[in-house]
Image (spheres, rainbow, N blue to C red):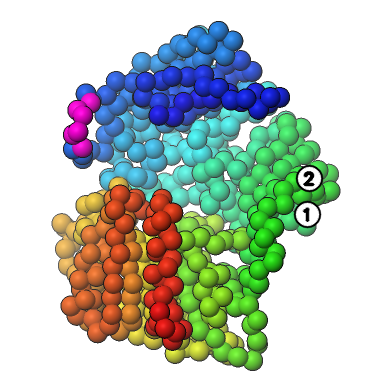
């Protein structure tokens, strides 16, 4: 069970300071000698050997707030709630704590089957014990709670906000609370795309400073660092300048706002930490704090760049093109699409290589690899996200992806007889749709995806809310879910692409049964090899290094055989 440990900065000696019977979930400093933490308390009676799973959207064990005095080791329980406290953030002066409470079994508002269980937000006075509800218009405040101004007078919160009945498509906004007066405000950012949505969960995109805050604003593949200064009538915005602007993906700042530490990366440069001064409106005097992954410099990884093309609705689509090592402009290369999940995700101009995103592995085999921020992706504004509504869930992204292929073909860069596609989650779902729609693909890898939706409606954490927002109700409109335009499983006989599939057996984001059904459909009706690999005990994203490696090995052999014409 997780407990709180304290590390002596001088000696490096670590020692535990809590012994919570059911472990510790979250913690926050409330002054130099006091720690607040949350821990489950009570709950169902334990039955040794009984691994029965109770299916419910409601949590069955309260999570409560505790205080630990480091000097005396005295523990005090501060709440007796019957619901779950899922995040805490104490003010620097130790007088207040902000937290979110819910009866939901999940910590993320989106992960509700039908979004009927509220998430409520509170500030608790640690001196008087008064709890007051705040941000009542906010359904999902993200990032582990709020952040406090250095003087503890103002609480900042990142709010994933939508006026829609169902929260699926949203903008990330900044809200403030003046603690003494109780006055709340939505900050007018002067930026229609809102705060960067790919980094907001870690709260690395907002840093309160004296007189205001720094924020990372959404701007497609190149987020922008901005400073907001409080004035008597609102907020003054300054988009900062600097060599690394557009490639800063998280940061923290000193209280005076004049020194900032940030994470810098490009598609060709692995992430490193930098420290810099802010002079006026300029991020200046950059100094690199870390020098990680030095061994990568010795490897020929090829290069990558952000490119654009015209996709569905005549919109500009951004993506990353990875070149194979030794690329020659006069030659034509195989093309592999590497499709991101979500759809509310975004590929930035950042160095990425992962078991579910093997872009350089495919490039080193001799392929151009294209990612795409297709319609529905984050960081391009609410209209771009919501463009998938009205029956466009498949049609617009497929149009975007095929337009990317066509553009590279027009440039004479690719051999359209050697196409492949790889994806995980929605990337796997779109890959399944592509191979039913376009028979040019010679190899496909579909991870944690599928091509039908009834099982996901029932099994997914967010099944009812997702299908109602993007599709229809399968009970009220069953014909919608057997239309091949909405469920490519029913076009299984059109699949000619050799396809390998992967899925965790305990996936509750995308039902494992989606892969089972799609696999059986292609096995029976498709005229192509198909294989399915299941990973016991695994959730949506594989946790075991053994399973991650096995996925990469089998996928690599599959593409060697069917795309690169090598012996597997």
The verdict on residue 433 being magenta is no
User: Horizontally, is 180 left or right of 539 in the view?
Assistant: right
User: Horizontally, is 120 left or right of 6 in the view?
Assistant: left
Q: Position of residue 124 (x, y in %)?
A: 49, 18
Query: Looking at the picture, does residue 436 appear above or below residue 460?
Result: below
> Is residue 388 something one can see in this rendering?
no
Ranked by sequence position, the earlier of labels 1 and 2 is 1
Query: Looking at the picture, does residue 195 appear above or below residue 90?
Result: below
In the image, 390 versus 19, the foreground residue is: 19
Chain part drawn in magenta: 46-51
Residue at the image position 15 percent from the left and 57 percent from the top: 475
Q: Which quarter of the picture shows residue 323?
A: bottom right
Figure quadrant of the C terminus: bottom left
Q: Residue beneath label 2, please?
A: 276
Q: Residue beneath label 1, please?
A: 242
The verdict on residue 50 being magenta is yes
Residue at the image position 27 percent from the left and 45 percent from the top: 114
Cα–Cα span, label 1 and label 2: 10 Å
Query: Looking at the picture, does residue 74 appear above or below residue 299?
Result: above
């Amino acid at each position: 069970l997780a407990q709180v440990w304290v590390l002596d900065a001088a000696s490096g000696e670590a020692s535990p300071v809590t012994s919570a019977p059911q472990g510790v979930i979250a913690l926050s400093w409330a002054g130099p000698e006091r720690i607040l933490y949350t821990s489950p308390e009570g709950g169902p009676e334990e039955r040794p050997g009984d691994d029965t799973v109770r299916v419910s959207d409601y949590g069955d064990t309260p999570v409560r707030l505790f205080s630990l005095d480091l000097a005396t080791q005295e523990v005090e329980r501060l709440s007796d709630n019957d619901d779950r406290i899922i995040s805490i953030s104490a003010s620097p002066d130790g007088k207040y704590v902000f937290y979110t409470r819910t009866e939901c079994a999940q910590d993320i508002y989106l992960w509700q089957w039908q979004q009927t269980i509220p998430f409520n937000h509170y500030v608790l006075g640690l001196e008087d014990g008064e709890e007051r509800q705040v941000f009542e218009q906010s359904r999902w405040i993200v990032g582990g709670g709020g952040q406090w101004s250095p003087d503890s007078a103002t609480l900042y919160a990142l709010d994933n906000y939508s006026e829609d009945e169902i929260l699926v498509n949203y903008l990330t906004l900044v809200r403030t609370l003046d603690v003494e007066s109780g006055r709340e405000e939505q900050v007018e950012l002067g930026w229609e795309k809102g705060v960067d949505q790919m980094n907001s969960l870690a709260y690395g995109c907002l840093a309160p400073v004296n007189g205001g805050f720094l924020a990372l604003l959404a701007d497609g593949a190149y987020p922008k660092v901005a400073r907001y200064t409080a004035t008597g009538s609102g907020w003054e915005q300054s988009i900062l300048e600097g060599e690394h602007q557009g490639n800063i993906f998280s940061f923290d700042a000193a209280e005076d706002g004049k020194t900032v530490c940030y994470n810098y990366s490009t598609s060709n440069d692995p992430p490193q930490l930098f420290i810099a001064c802010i002079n006026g409106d300029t991020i200046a005097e950059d100094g690199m704090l870390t020098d990680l992954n030095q061994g990568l410099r010795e490897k020929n990884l090829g290069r990558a760049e952000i490119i654009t093309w015209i996709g569905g609705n005549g919109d500009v689509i951004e993506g990353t093109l990875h070149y194979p090592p030794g690329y020659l402009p006069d030659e034509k290369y195989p093309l592999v699409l590497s499709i991101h999940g979500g759809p509310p995700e975004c590929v930035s101009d950042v160095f990425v290589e992962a078991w579910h995103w093997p872009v350089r592995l495919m490039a080193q085999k001799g392929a151009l690899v294209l990612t795409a921020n297709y319609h529905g992706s984050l960081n391009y504004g609410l209209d771009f996200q919501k463009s998938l509504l009205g029956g466009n869930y498949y049609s617009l992204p497929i149009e975007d992806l095929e337009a990317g292929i066509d553009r590279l073909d027009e440039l004479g860069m690719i051999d359209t007889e050697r196409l492949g596609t790889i994806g995980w989650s929605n990337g796997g779902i779109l890959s399944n749709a592509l191979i039913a729609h376009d028979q040019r693909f010679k190899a496909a890898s579909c991870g944690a995806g599928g091509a039908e939706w009834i099982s996901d409606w029932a099994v997914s954490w967010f099944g009812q809310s997702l299908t109602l927002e993007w599709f229809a109700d399968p009970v009220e409109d069953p014909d919608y879910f057997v239309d091949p335009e909405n469920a490519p499983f029913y076009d299984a006989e059109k699949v000619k692409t050799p396809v390998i599939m992967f899925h965790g057996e305990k996936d509750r984001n995308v039902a494992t049964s989606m892969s089972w059904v799609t696999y059986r459909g292609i096995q029976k009706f498709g005229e192509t090899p198909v294989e399915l690999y299941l990973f016991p005990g695994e959730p949506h994203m594989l946790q075991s290094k053994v399973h991650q490696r096995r996925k990469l090995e089998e996928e690599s052999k599959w593409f060697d055989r069917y795309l690169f014409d090598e012996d597997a």
